[in-house]
Image: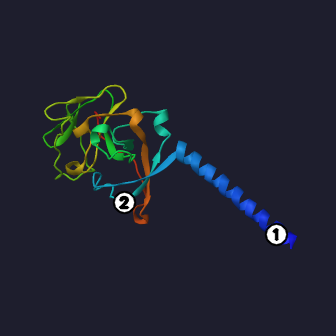
Amino acid sequence: MSSTVEKIGATFLDLIETMAISFSIFLVVYLFFLQPHQVNGQSMVPNFQSGEHVLTDKVTFKMRDPQRGEIVVFHAPPDAHCPEGTGCDFIKRVLGVPGDTVEVKENAIWVNSEKLPEPYIPSDYLILPGNATKGKGVYLGPNEYFVSGDNRPYSSDSRAWGAITKDMIVGRVFFRYWPVVAISTVGKASYPEPF
C-alpha cells in the first residue's frame, strides 16, 4: 500500500515540476521574446481580418529600428481614446520613419514629396487626412513613426493623432497563426526607390 502511495506521490511531484518548468519557459518567452495578439476591428482589412491571431516579435526592434512597410503592434496613444484600463494595443503598418515628412493628399500618402505606392490596399479606398495631417505635412523627429491601418476609411491612426514613438512599439508582427486557413508568415511591404 505505501509503495503505491509513494508512486502516486512521485508521479504527482513530477507532474508539478514539469508544469512549473513549462510555465517558467512560457513566461520568459512571453515577457521577452514573443507575444500573441488578436486583431480587433476592421482597420487592417483586406490584409488582416478581425479575430485573426498573430505573433509579435519583441526582440527585433531592440537591435534595429522599425522599417517602412512593417506591421507593428503598439500601445495606443492617449489621443486614440481607448477605454481606461484596457491595455489597448493597435496593429498598423509603418509608413513613415524618422526624418520623413508625411502628407495625406490626392487620395494617397506622400512621403518626402513622393507618392507612396501601396499595392497592398485596394485602389478604391478613400484616403483622407485626419486632424494631425489636415492641410499640412507631419515631420518625424528621432524615434517617431507614422503608422496607418490598411483599411484607410476605417482606421484610427497617425492621420488622426500624429506620430508614435519607438518606445510605444511592442514589436513586429511576423506570423499569423489563427484561423488555420490563414496561417502564414507576415513580411514587410517593399517599395521602389526612393523609398
Kindly identify the residue that appears in the image at 17 percent across and 40 percent down: 129
- Residue 19 is left or right of residue 101, and the answer is right
What numbered label is drawn on residue 5? 1
Q: Residue most toward the bottom?
A: 1
**Image quarter of residue 41:** bottom left
Q: Nearer the viewer, residue 83 or 124?
A: 83
Local packing at callout 1 (Cα closer than 10 Å; few below 14, some 14-19, many 20+) is few
Q: Quadrant of residue 109?
A: top left
**Amino acid carrying mark 1 in the image:** Val
Towards the viewer: 42 or 23: 23
The image quarter containing residue 178 is: bottom left
Amino acid of disc 2: Gly
* Residue 38 appears in view: yes
Mark closer to the observer (1, 2): 1
Q: Secondary structure at mark 2?
A: loop
Residue under numbered circle 2: 51
CB of mark 1 within 8 Å of CB of mark 2?
no
Which percent across, then down, holds residue 133?
19, 35
